Image: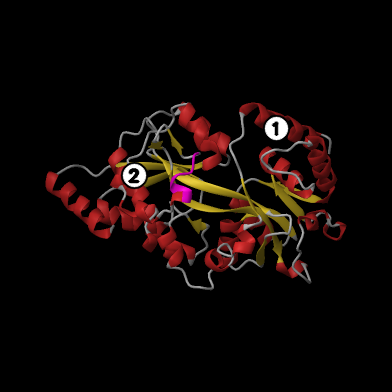
Amino acid sequence: MKTLLLTSAVALAASGAVADEIRVLNWQGYGTDLDWAVDAFAEATGHTVVHEYFNSEQEMLTKLRTNPGAYDVVMINAAFTPQAISEELISPIDTATLENFAGIPASFAEDPKLNADGQTYGVPWTWGLTSFAINTEAWDDTPTSILALWDEAHAGRVSIRDDAVEAMQLGALATGQDINDIRDLDAAAAKIAELLPNLRTFWSSENDWNQFMAAGELDAATYWSGSASRSAALGLPVQFVIPEEGAVGWLDGLSIPATSEHKDAALQFIDHMIDPDFYVKWDAEGAPASANAEAADALPDDAFNKAVLGDPEVAARVHFQAPIDDETREKYLEVWQGLKASQ
């Protein structure tokens, strides 16, 4: 990888070409915008990296639809990639040009959500869980059930993300249902209605979550596994919980918008992001699990993303989310808005 990037940089200098600026669309603080990572990429390739952020997948899709040519790389949750493909918002990717793609196992590389008509539209990057994390100073023992969020002993000190899909999936787990086939939505919604009086606030971003936890306002809150690792690395008293009911699994991929004018540089950046050397350094600062098996293998044996997420017993409790059609998504949103309005 390093040889490839340096060769590209030399070629760029020899041609006298002006270095391209590539624009990346992602969550804030999610790997691609690490100062040391973008600095290393710029030094190796001559390409500078500028970021723009979103706070929801719907916002991400809207930005792609309404800002043609504005982005060169976009991070997309795999459950939303089929929609981006169907709307022709992203381009096929020639994975043969990615030196580090060989480390990605077929279980991720051939994921049908990232591929269509024999072409790859999303490069598997990271994966992880949506569950909840606790303030370790507020619990004598680590809870083992998702129902801990409903515990009246922590009333007014719980938070969940303001997201309709996550809320309905949380209700599904709490009522023993399949997150990808919620047959009794009324039961899931009723369970969330029971939770709302326990909430102190909603959160929308990792920064929000960290601020609430740092201020000592929360005992427990839904969260993402990688974010929990980053919060703990910041010194917050945080422990991620994978309850007996299981957790929602997700896969994030890197894609190239169809209107990108810097596709070659975008490919270089994606290859940089799936490089095991990058990932091992990122993991030490708090990262989700890597989709690159070579990167995961390079971690210390006691690393969370190897010791915990690599545990077969834990893996058996992961419910990977499938794409959600527009009708179902609208129904979830309608139910969620109704629940919030009733409080």
Residue 268 placement, left or right of 255? left
The residue at which mark 1 appears reads as: 333
Res. 218 visible in picture: no
x, y percentage for residue 178?
A: 71, 43
Residue drawn at x 82%, y 53% as measured from the top left: 150
Nearest the eye: 54 or 123: 123
Q: CA distance from mark 2 to mark 1?
A: 36 Å
Nearest the eye: 23 or 242: 242
Nearest the eye: 48 or 287: 287
Three-letter amino acid code at the position of disc 2: Thr
- Where 316 falls versus 83 (above or below)? below
- The answer to the question of whether label 2 and label 1 lie on touching residues, with beta carbons closer than 8 A, is no
Three-letter amino acid code at the position of disc 1: Leu
Residue 225 placement, left or right of 66? right
- Where 129 falls versus 312 (above or below)? above
The N terminus - image quarter: bottom left
Categorize mark 2 by other alpha carbons within 10 Å: few (<14), some (14-19), many (20+): some
Residue drawn at x 46%, y 63% as measured from the top left: 296
Whether 247 is among the magenta residues is no
x, y percentage for residue 72?
A: 37, 38
x, y percentage for residue 15?
A: 13, 44
Residue sitting farthest toward the left: 14
The residue at which mark 2 appears reads as: 95
Categorize mark 1 by other alpha carbons within 10 Å: few (<14), some (14-19), many (20+): some
Task: Give whichever of discs 2 and 1 has the lower sequence position.
Answer: 2
Whether 111 is among the magenta residues is yes
Say what secondary structure mark 1 lies in: helix
Q: In front: mark 2 or mark 1?
A: 2
Say what secondary structure mark 2 lies in: helix
Q: Which contiguous range is marked in magenta?
A: 107-112
